[in-house]
Image (spheres, rainbow, N blue to C red):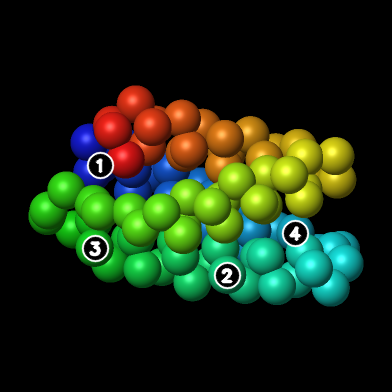
Amino acid sequence: MDNKELRKTLHQLQDEIKSIKAVDDTGKVLLHNLEDDISALLERSGGNPVQVHPSVVQRLEGAVSHFEVTHPDLTTLISNLLESLSNAGI
């Protein structure tokens, strides 16, 4: 995944997170952490290849598990991001 595609996916994920209204307390924490992770990734994806810390991947995977039933669009975007990162060897 090149930086342009990564940035597009991250922006889509940001938009989806902003559109979510009803979540439980755990979901609120997960969304807040995802927002922070996405912002950091966007900052680093300007010109250099993005390095993703394993803890970010773990939080993304945890979010998929938590939201897969209640927010399928969000989990699809996160899953696509995880797949792209995996394909890129991250």
Which element type, helix, strand or loop, lies under badge 4? loop
Disc 4 or 2, which lies upstream in sequence? 4
58 displayed left or right of 37:
right
Report the disc number at residue 20. 4
Q: Position of residue 31 (x, y in %)?
A: 66, 65
Disc 2 or 1, which lies upstream in sequence? 1
* Point 77% across, 64% down: residue: 27
Badge 3 amino acid = Arg
Badge 3 is on which residue? 44
Badge 2 is on which residue? 33
Disc 1 or 4, which lies upstream in sequence? 1
Q: Nearer the viewer, mark 2 or mark 1?
A: 2
Residue 32 visible here: yes
Q: Nearer the viewer, mark 4 or mark 2?
A: 2
* Point 49% across, 72% down: residue: 36
Structural crowding at the residue carrying mark 3, measured as other residues with C-alpha within 10 Å and reported as few (<14), some (14–19) or many (≥20): some
Marks 3/1 in contact by CB < 8 Å: the verdict is no
Residue 8's image quarter?
A: top left
Structural crowding at the residue carrying mark 4, measured as other residues with C-alpha within 10 Å and reported as few (<14), some (14–19) or many (≥20): few
Q: Mark 3 to mark 4: distance in Å? A: 25 Å
